[in-house]
Image (cartoon, grey):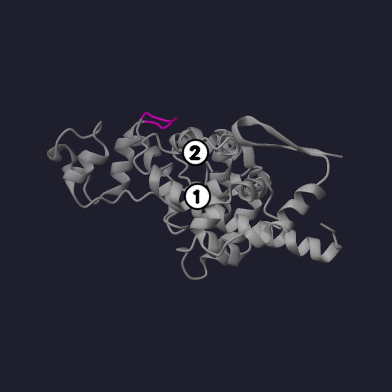
Amino acid sequence: MGWKQAGPLGASLEHHDHTSALRHLVHHQHRLPAGRAEWQHDKSIRRRLELYPVAGGLTGMLLRQALPRVRGTAAETWVGPLNGACTRYEITRSARRMAAFLGHIAHESGYLHAVEENLRYKDADRLTKVFPSAFKTPADAGPYVDKPDALANKVYANRMGNGDPASGDGWRYRGRGLIQLTGRDNYVAFAKDVDMAVVQNPDLVATPRYAALSAAWFWKKHGLNELADIEAYQALSKRINSSLQSFPEREAKRKYALDVLCRATLANIVSSVSTFGLRY
């Protein structure tokens, strides 16, 4: 049986047999230079590799290589939750999808470090810049300096399914997860999908399992797999953050992760060829 996988600009790449693709990749693997800059320019081989799944998923070592600023033992903590979440929401189907996901969660979470929105601001001027619709002047923002719960209840009131400031919903359903899940409506929708009481216990979304699941759920729900498939990376970024100010940094992280994943994919292919004695 053949299989189809989305290719560049929506084209469908149909592989009735992996053999010809394997032969091509292995035959030309000697052409792959050691330097990242030259490797980026080897388009024909690179684009084939991008469409392969990451065989066996992530390992702790591969995650550290793809996201080199992941700290200490964080890779071992996150690799299981990320593999489970990415498999469930079809992100593992290609290195292209996986790299885009890893690049964005790295940016959103500070390389898997921050899983909860930081609403503790020390400066009223800063609050007026971050939340201009809520605070017109520093004097308006003054009462919310260094008061994260009050701030959340103010700026997230009567939005995204939250109640008024007195309800406490803004703080209760503040941003959590690797792509911050925010607002009661989003917690309700996510809870329904994973069949877990995250509405009643929203702090679950700050734990590795649900932080990863919520990010992958958001990714799939908003069509980001399909945007990665057609390499619409700017449109993909806007669905996570409507401002493109951080797009260059996000792209740099995605490209770095993609380089690592493609090299790992090639190594797996070469190993498979050696194991099964495929002739090329």
- Check whether the beta carbons of the residues at disc 2 and disc 1 lie within 8 A of each other: yes
Identify the mark at residue 66; answer none if there is no mark.
none
* Range of residues picked out in magenta: 158-163
Left or right relative to 220: residue 234: left
Give residue 103's position: percent from left, percent from top.
Answer: 49, 50
Q: 89 above or below 66?
A: above
Residue annotated with mark 1: 254
Helix, strand or loop at label 2? It is helix
| Among numbered discs 2 and 1, the one appearing first in the sequence | 2
Amino acid carrying mark 1 in the image? Arg
Give residue 219's position: percent from left, percent from top.
Answer: 55, 40
Residue annotated with mark 2: 233
Residue in the foreground of this view, choosing between 111 and 7: 7
Image quadrant containing the C terminus? bottom right
Residue in the foreground of this view, choosing between 255 and 153: 255
Q: 109 above or below 231?
A: below
